[in-house]
Image: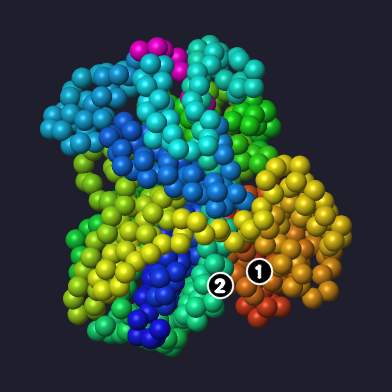
Amino acid sequence: MQQSERVLILGAGINGVAIARELLLNNIPVCIIDQGDLSQGATSKSSRLIHGGLRYLEYGDFSLVKESVHERGILLKLAPHFVKPLRFAIPLAHRASGVTSSGLRFLSGFRVPGTHWLSTKFSFSSERGLYLVDMGLTLYDWFASKGTLPKHSVHDVGDTGLPQINTDKFRWMACYSDAQMRFPERFVVALLHDCQKIANERQLSFELLTYQRLKLNGRTAQISSIHAPEQIHEEFEPTVIINASGACGDLTLQQAEIPSERLMGGTKGSHIITFNQKLREALGSRAIYSEASDGRLVFILPFENSTLIGTTDVRVKGNPLDVTATPDELEYLVGMVNMVFPQVGLTTDDINLHYSGVRPLPYQPQGKAASISRDHSLKEYEGPSGWIVTLVGGKLTSWRAFAEKVTNRILKKLGKSYFTESKTRLIPGAEGYPQTEDILKAEQDRLCQKYQLSLESIQALWHLQGTQIEEILDALPDLSTDLITGTVIPRQYVLWTIQHEWAETLGDLVERRLMLVFDETLKEATLKDLADCLVESGKLSADEIPTLIAEYQQHLAKFYGKAVS
C-alpha cells in the first residue's frame, strides 16, 4: 500500500478511531491526530449508555432507533467486558396523560408546519402516562425483536426487586432493557490496540498523534506539536481529510482555513456522580428513566458503587471543550433525584464529581434542544486543500454503523470496493470471555494466584483490559506487588500504560486510562506517584511535578468539581 494513499483523521474520539479501524480493515493506511488526548470530548462526557434511543420514537426517528437497537445487539456480543445489559424502570403517575403533547413531538420530528405554534400556544400535559409509555415500549420491543434482551413489563410501584421510588407520586413502573458502557474511554483504547494489530498484520501505516495541530499548505498536511507549532513533526498529502472532531468540527475547519457554513449546533449535557449509599440502595441493580419537572427525560444509573445522574440539554456557544456544569444544572439534577427518591434527601454536597460535554449535533437554530436529530450525516468539501469530509452528529451507540457509512463513501470515491469485518470482529479483551459469573470469578481467582495480586487489583485491571490483562501482565518484567498509593493498581502496569497506550499527561492517566477520577477518593499522593511514573517514562522532568500537580488539582476542581485529599 502506497504511503500517498494515507487518510488523515482529525479527532481521536470514538468516531474517529472507529473510522480508522474500518479503513485499516479495508487496507487503507491511516494517521489520526488530535489537539488534545484521545476521547477528551463527547466520548468521555456522555451518559455512558448503549441504548436504542427510546425517546427518538417520539420524534419519528425510526431508522435511528432501528440502527441503534441493532448496534446494541452487536456490541453486547463483541464487547462483553465493556458493554453490559441494564434494566430500566420508567416511573408513571397517570394512565392516559401526555398523548397530545407526545403527538405534537412526533409531528415536529417530521417538520409538520404548525406543530411548534400549537405546542407553545396551548398548554398540554407533557407528562407521559402508562398507556402512552406501554405503547412506545411495545414498538421498542418490536425493533429489538431479534435481540436476546428481555421485553418490557409493567409493574405496580412497590413490587419486589424494583427501585424504591416515591409511592406518593408514582403508581406504576414500566421496565425495559438497554445496555451500559461504563468506560467508553477504555473502549476507544481497545479499538486503537485493534488498529495497531490490523496494521501490523497487513503491513499498513498507522499512527496516532495526540496534542498535535494541523496546518494545510495547499494539499499538504503539516503536523506539529501544539507546544512547538513551528517544528513540523510530519507532512504528507492525504487522500482525504476526515474531520471527526465532534462538536469542535466548525472550529477545526476555521483553524484549517477551510470555508464552510455552520454545521454544528451542539447542546451541553451535564452529569453528576454521587456515592450516597441511601440512593444506591434504593436504586438497586436497575436504572431509572424519568421525567423531570420540565418534561425532559433524565437517567439515574447504577455506576458500580456510585450513582450517575444525567443529563441536561442546553444550547451553548464558544469552545465545546471549555464547558462546565453550572450550579443551576447541578440543582436541576439533584431535584430530579429527590422527586423520584424523596427519602434520600440528596443535596449538592453529596456530589462527588460532575462533568459536562457538548453533543456533536447538527445546527438547528430554532426549536427545543431535545428536538434536534441525534442521527449522523456527512458534509463534504473539495477545494485547494483537497477533499475534506466532516462528520455531523453521531452517538456512542452507533459508532460502528457511522464508521461503515464513512468508509463506504470514501472507498466508493476512491474507486475501491468496501467490505466490513467489524460486525463480527471481537473488541480486544473479549477473546475467551467467561460466559457466566461463576466462570468469571474462577478466572479472576486464578489470576490472583498467578500474579500474587489481590482480587481487588485483578478486578480493577479486568475492568480496564478484559481478558487482555493476562497477556499484559505476562509481558511485564519481574512483576511486583507495588501499588500506586491510594489505588489497587500495580505501578508496573501504569508504566506499561504510559508506554503502550498513548498517555502523555497526568490527566490522560487519571481521567482516560486508569479511570481514577471516578474513585470516591483521589489522593494527592496518588497524583505524585503517577507523576513519578511519567518522569520515569520520560514524559516530564522531576522539577515540574509540584507545579503540575497544583495545576491539575485546579483542573479537576473546575471541570469535575473533584476534590483531592
Spot occupied by residue 137 in the image (x, y as percentages of width and height): 41, 26
Spot occupied by residue 557 in the image (x, y as percentages of width and height): 57, 53
Which quarter of the figure has residue 547? bottom right
Q: At 30% across and 73% down in the image, what residue appears? A: 416
Q: Amino acid at mark 1?
A: Thr
Q: Are marks 2 and 1 in contact (CB under 8 Å)?
A: no
Examine the structure image and report whether residue 184 is included in the region drawn in magenta: no
In this orientation, does residue 355 appear? no
Which quarter of the figure has residue 458? bottom right
Residue picked out by circle 1:
497
User: Viewer-nearest of labels 2 and 1?
Assistant: 2
Which label's residue is closer to the chain start, 2 or 1? 2
Q: Is residue 501 left or right of residue 370?
A: right
**Magenta stretch, residue numbers:** 89-96
What residue occupies the far left of the structure in this picture? 113
Spot occupied by residue 282 in the image (x, y as percentages of width and height): 64, 25
Coloration of the structure image: rainbow
Residue picked out by circle 2:
197
